[in-house]
Amino acid sequence: MADSLSLALQLILGADRELLGIVALSLRVSAAACLCGALLGLLLGAWLAVARFPGHRVLVWAVNTLLALPAVVVGLLVYLLLSRSGPLGHWGLLFTPSAMVVAQAVLVVPLIAALTRRLVGDALREGGDQLRSLGAGPLMAALLMLLHERFAVMTVLLTAFGRAIAEVGAVMIVGGNIAGVTRVMTTAIALETSKGDLPLALALGLVLLGVVGLVNLAVGLLQGRSAGEREVFV
Amino acid sequence: MSAGPPALLSLHDAGVWLGTVRALDAVSLTLHRGERLALLGSNGSGKTTLLRLLHGLLPHDGARRLHDLQPEGRVPRLAMLFQRPFLMSLNVRRNLQLALWLQGLPRGERAARTDAALQRFGMAGLAARAARELSGGQQQRLALARAWALGPDLLFLDEPTASLDPGAKREVESLVASLGDEGITWVMSTHNLGQAKRLATRVIYLEGGRLQADAPVQEFFGDRPPAAAAAFLRAENAWR
């Protein structure tokens, strides 16, 4: 165990090319997934905060339920969509980083939408009437609240990034864990552990822990800033 | 016989449900151009709900009609100041510009009106400050500047001095008085009888969501106030 840890640290400190490649791909895929997920999730969350129509509650319930969606289920659904016989099979995305981006985006959209809906709803209770009195329609007021609560929105997006980069099931299924092509930190850790190559698995685990730790640190700082603003206002 | 000031806004038999509560019931009134109307009543009497209804922010039953301005022949512009002003987490200048952007004004006019509002309300030196870091009085002044920048014909003020210290209260009160002098018609809810007496030309008294009295200010605070408001005035004056 001590030997493995020592080798792992050597890989990290020596900037091992394979390690760096895997880390870079992980960051690229999860960042792209969060960007796509943010576009959809922020709009969906803002819209759900103000829209009123028959079935609205069911939709909100569905989005909240999807928060607990297992990553492997997302992987399976995206696999079925992108497989050669699936409806989007002609895109030829399966076992490419793009498929992994799609899977992780699907995973984070409900998270971003549900948290955004709550965030915007709370903000509208405070200032919705004021914005409407200034001439904003309901959706415009909701979108302005995303600007108003931008630090909290960043927290939501960082939380989504943390969820995306730490999942293994979806990217394993749709990416295939192909060395140098679709191998990311989580899939590599699973593979190397099963092969008994603990140093690389441990090194990747440490880097992943570091990335998630940095994300959490950023979330904490943003939450502090957001809370600080509220205290000043109160 | 000369006609009185033209009507700006009227309610006929209007009522509002807030959930299962009948917050306003069978309210009829006509607001005329140039009036300064104070809404009085105890907590929960329906003052804020009436202001929101007058502005058009609430679904209601009965009729609400906004009359065209005479002689301009256009729909009056409305603005509202809330008891606790909501300011975006932007700087002072951007808060003003955002309100004007929502009105669809072109960039040049937005800039000109923003500068005018900053000057008019003595906030030019605070233009780059974060709006939510201002003091309570400054925030209310900014909210008033924002409402003024919209060029309103009719301004609704929901207890604009309720949470302010005496100095800020005097300052906001004098700004409200000057807006009336500029020809802006306003409706203000307040618990402060002295303020209503000093600033208003007409007083409406609400109780339990119903309009109980509607009289010129001299009559309302005179020797023979409306019977429905007499008990309220006695109770309020007992504290003074």
Image: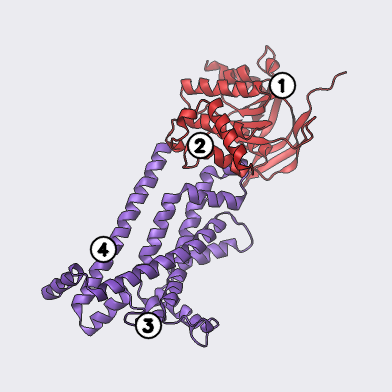
Chain colours: A purple, B red
Q: Give the quadrant of residue A153.
A: bottom left
CA distance for labels 4 and 3 = 25 Å
Reading the image, the residue beneath label 3 is A176
User: In this view of the protein, which residue sits in the foreground, B110 or B196?
Assistant: B110
User: In this view of the protein, which residue sits in the foreground, B213 or A86?
Assistant: A86
Reading the image, the residue beneath label 4 is A210
Query: Residue visible at 54% across and 27% down?
Result: B119
Decide if residue B86 is in sight here.
Answer: no
In the structure shown, which secondary structural element does the residue marked by tag 4 occupy? helix
In front: mark 1 or mark 4? Answer: 4
Reading the image, the residue beneath label 1 is B215
Badge 3: chain ID: A
A128 lies left or right of B12? left
Amino acid type for the residue under numbered disc 2: Arg
Q: Residues within 10 Å of mark 2 (few under 14, many from 20)?
A: many
Residue A123 percent across, percent down from the top left:
50, 47
User: In this view of the protein, which residue sits in the foreground, A104 or B239?
Assistant: A104
Amino acid type for the residue under numbered disc 4: Gly
In front: mark 2 or mark 1? Answer: 2
In front: mark 3 or mark 1? Answer: 3
On residue B93, which mark appears? Answer: 2
Badge 4: chain ID: A
Residue farthest along the front direction in this orientation: B108
In the structure shown, which secondary structural element does the residue marked by tag 2 occupy? helix
CA distance for labels 2 and 1 = 40 Å
Q: Residues within 10 Å of mark 1 (few under 14, many from 20)?
A: some
B42 lies left or right of A147? right
CA distance for labels 4 and 2 = 41 Å
Badge 1: chain ID: B
Decide if residue B25 is in sight here.
Answer: yes
In front: mark 3 or mark 2? Answer: 2
